[in-house]
Amino acid sequence: MSADYPDLPIEGRDQWRSWLAGHGTVARGVWVVTWKKGSGEPHVSYGDLVEEALAAGWVDSRPRAVDDRRSALLVTPRKPTSR
C-alpha cells in the first residue's frame, strides 16, 4: 500500500541524487516531497525527479498533494522483471 512508504522532503536535484546513491539499493520506495513551482520555495521539477530516479533504476508512480504548497511523488525501485 502506498501509505506505507516514508516521506522524503527534498529541495534540490543533488539532494535526491545523493539519497538514491545512499539508499537506492535497500529502500523499497519513498514519497518524494517537493515544493510546488509557485510556492516561492526551492522547486525540483518532475523531469529532474524522474531523470534521477531512472538513472538509479527507480520509477515514478503516483502523485499526491501534501498541502497547498507541496506535492509528493511515489518513487520505487524497478522490479527485476520489468522491461
Image (spheres, helix red, strand yellow):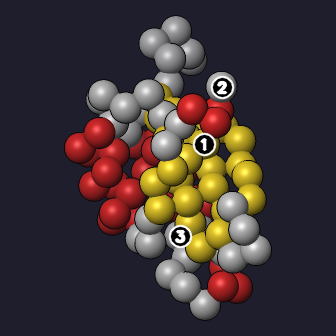
> Pointer 1: what residue?
74
Distance from Cα at disc 1 to Cα at disc 2: 11 Å
- Mark 2: few/some/many CA within 10 Å (<14, 14-19, 20+): few
Lower sequence index among marks 2 and 3: 2
Residue 15: which quarter of the image? bottom left
Which three-letter amino acid code belongs to the residue tagged 1? Leu
Q: Residue furthest top?
A: 81
Residue drawn at x 50%, y 17% as measured from the top left = 79
Which three-letter amino acid code belongs to the residue tagged 2? Met
Residue contact at pointers 1 and 2, CB within 8 angstroms: no
Q: Position of residue 59 (x, y in %)?
A: 55, 36
Q: Residue furthest bottom?
A: 40
Residue 67 sits above or below residue 6 on the image = below
Instruction: Label 3, secondary structure: give it.
Output: loop
In the image shown, does 7 or 40 lie closer to the viewer?
Answer: 7
Q: Which mark is residue 1?
A: 2
Lower sequence index among marks 1 and 2: 2
Residue 34: which quarter of the image? bottom right
Residue 43: which quarter of the image? bottom right
> Pointer 3: what residue?
44
Closer to the camera: disc 3 or disc 1? Answer: 1
Instruction: Label 2, secondary structure: give it.
Output: loop
In the image shown, does 67 or 12 lie closer to the viewer?
Answer: 67
